[in-house]
Amino acid sequence: MALLERSEWYDIARRTEWTPGYVSDDELYPEGHSGDYDIPGEAWSTYDEPYKISYREYVDIQRQKDAGAYSVKAALERMDLRSKVDPGWISTLKLHYGAVSVVEYNAGLMESRFVRWARSPGMRNMGTFGMLDEIRHAQLQLFFPHEYVPTDRQFDWAHSGMKSNNWGIIAGRHFFDDMMMTRDAVSTSILLNFAFETGFTNLQFIGLSSDAANAGDFSFSKLIQSIQSDEARHAQIGTPMLAMMIENGEKERAQRLVDVAFWRSWKLFTILTGIPMDYYIPLDKREGSFKEFMQEWIVTQFVNSLEDLGLAKPWYWDIFLADIDEHHHGQQLGTWSWRPTLWFSPAAGVGPDERDWLEEKYPGWNDTFGKCWDAIIENLKRGDIGRTVPGTLPIICNMSNIPIRRTTRWSTTGGSTTSARSPIAGSSSRTRSATPPTKRSLIACSPARSSPPTSAVCCSTWASACSATAVATPTTTSGCPPTSRVPTRRRRTDRWQHSHSR
Ligand SMILES: [Fe+2]
Ligand SMILES: [Fe+2]
């Protein structure tokens, strides 16, 4: 008997739209779970997923992917990779596993909510495959680091990290709870699938995959490729939903969801991807800078997909573009300085060759961020480790839960605020600008906005790392720009002042 082509039966098979007989539509799809957005009943069936696959095809492909990833791991297990690769690469692995592995299980829960609550049959179908994808991702990313646990307990954070109250983990958990676990199906598909997965997971998975291969970690490279091919499929769940919202007069709310998710994702990825790409990956193995990846994957590709849908760039786009140049450099200073609080040993990545590379990729780095590292290096050379570890906590953003920091470029004019206590004057091995950083450059945290400054902010990372050089006095100014629409409150200012009087 001749078999039908998939295209001949797919639409009928996945449209299991039964008419409920003993519950109302509202009971079947409560607004809090399903999302309504004033889309009329008949419009839900117009959802047309761009990626169509049958269950039989799905299982066959996934089996092959699993076989590929697990067999590469088995073949390379005896290489004792952990003791052979650069420590910076090990930092990358630990950061990734601790922040990502268990989140994949949560993503499976998210997809399962689509399976039950999504009003579009096509979305429920995509959600079913997405749920199986995410369970597979969690299993892979718990199994792969497990081989390292007997010799390095920090790899155990792949499993235990998300259950801890580590500050970095709290930031990640807050993000994923907000974007993926606590909203209705419509909103989640835009926040997570469209903005986060289409926009940002590419950065983490494609970027890391090629870096892993370059670093000689072929089993991680294969693992990441295997996951990315699933992400590329279920990331498309949100796009038809966005198109439906726009068609049905909900463009403004769709734009707001994209704006919120994009900013939150950006902040998280400055640490998750930005730091490893520009500091942890061994210099001779780097594929490109974080900024270059951002420009290719976000500034070009993500904006194209927004414009294809008729949406605009987020309202804070200029602020974001400026942030690409610098935010993660400040977070690297912060995470390295607060290294005793992390579940991995962060690499500094600022040797002379690395600094030349950073200067080439981010012109002005040596005269800005490099000055903070000058102070740290000089303190280390003198054996004064205490001065390289902050004695207090950073000021944390109420929304993104990561240290607040932003700077304008160091000013090259104006008065000097270099502390008289500075132990490093004239002793750096690196060239410094003739004029030391000014106080203004440390505290100017936000581009000019029409509203008056209101909340305490910023530069905690910088100022602490630079405690041996320019000492910034906390001040009131505006915070992370897009949080200006979110209530913020002052935190820990007393501790801040204390830390800078040391
Ligand atoms: Fe995943
Ligand atoms: Fe995913």
Image (cartoon, grey):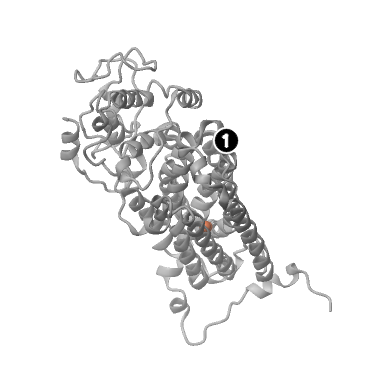
Pointer 1 residue Cβ closer than 8 Å to ligand 1? no
Task: Give the camera-side residue of 85 and 48.
Answer: 85
Q: Amino acid at mark 1?
A: Glu
Q: Can residue 60 be seen in the rendering of this structure? A: yes
Look at 59% across and 77% down and name the residue there: 17
- On the image, the x and y values in percent for residue 36 come to 46, 67
Q: Quadrant of the N terminus?
A: bottom right
Left or right relative to 173: residue 458: left
Report x, y in % for residue 42: 57, 71
- Residue 390 is situated, as x and y percent measured from the top left of the image, at 25, 36
456 on left or right of 125: left
Mark 1 sits on what residue?
287
| Residue at the image point whose x is 41% and y is 48% from the top | 264
Identified at 27% across, 27% down, the residue is 383
Who is closer to the viewer here, 323 or 241? 323
Q: Residues within 10 Å of mark 1 (few under 14, many from 20)?
A: some
